[in-house]
Amino acid sequence: MIAGSDPRIVCGARCVWWDGIGKTVLRGPHHVPCCPHCGGVLFEYADEATWWAGIMAYELDGHSGYAKFIEWLRGQCFATHASAVAAYRASGGVYG
């Protein structure tokens, strides 16, 4: 794991997991941060403010409920956006 004081936020390139970089696992000979559930590689954002700015811009662009969905999604790994949305709806969430 990466030090807890690192402000970076990471999200899945092949899954929809996201969280702080300190929640990742290091894999491979170069110790690349990966999703702790599926081992997938990740995209990186400088900090949580940068992450949420993008989320809020998307919500304000006509995607009502997106921010609450992303908040719910934190720390969970789903293989696809569609499977994550289905699980969110099954839990009572409203999005899309």
Image (cartoon, rainbow, N blue to C red):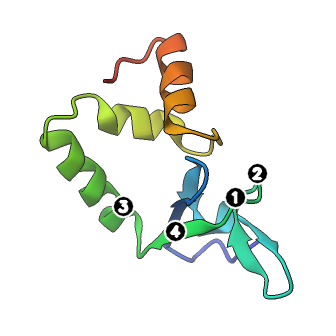
Instruction: Identify residue type, mark 1.
Output: Cys
Which residue is drawn at the image coordinates 63% and 38% (left, top)?
78
Q: Nearer the viewer, residue 74 or 58?
A: 58
Residue topped by disc 2: 38
Q: Nearer the viewer, mark 3 or mark 4?
A: 4
Q: In terms of sequence position, does the residue under pointer 3 or pointer 4 come before the other? A: 4
Q: In terms of sequence position, does the residue under pointer 1 or pointer 3 come before the other? A: 1
Label 4 SS: strand
Callout 2–callout 1 Cβ contact below 8 Å: yes
Q: In terms of sequence position, does the residue under pointer 4 or pointer 2 come before the other? A: 2
Tell me the number on the disc at residue 51: 3
Instruction: Identify residue type, mark 4.
Output: Phe
Instruction: Identify residue type, mark 2.
Output: Cys
Label 3 SS: helix
Label 1 SS: loop
Residue topped by disc 4: 43
| Mark-to-mark CA distance, 2 and 3 | 22 Å
Give above or below for 94 relative to 52: above
Q: In terms of sequence position, does the residue under pointer 2 or pointer 3 come before the other? A: 2
Give above or below for 86 relative to 30: above
Residue topped by disc 1: 35
Instruction: Identify residue type, mark 3.
Output: Trp
Which residue is drawn at the image coordinates 54% and 44% (left, top)?
74
Label 2 SS: loop
Picture coordinates of residue 94 (x, y %)? 35, 17
Give above or below for 42 relative to 72: below
| Mark-to-mark CA distance, 4 and 2 | 15 Å
| Mark-to-mark CA distance, 1 and 3 | 17 Å
Residue 48: which quarter of the image? bottom left
| Mark-to-mark CA distance, 2 and 1 | 6 Å
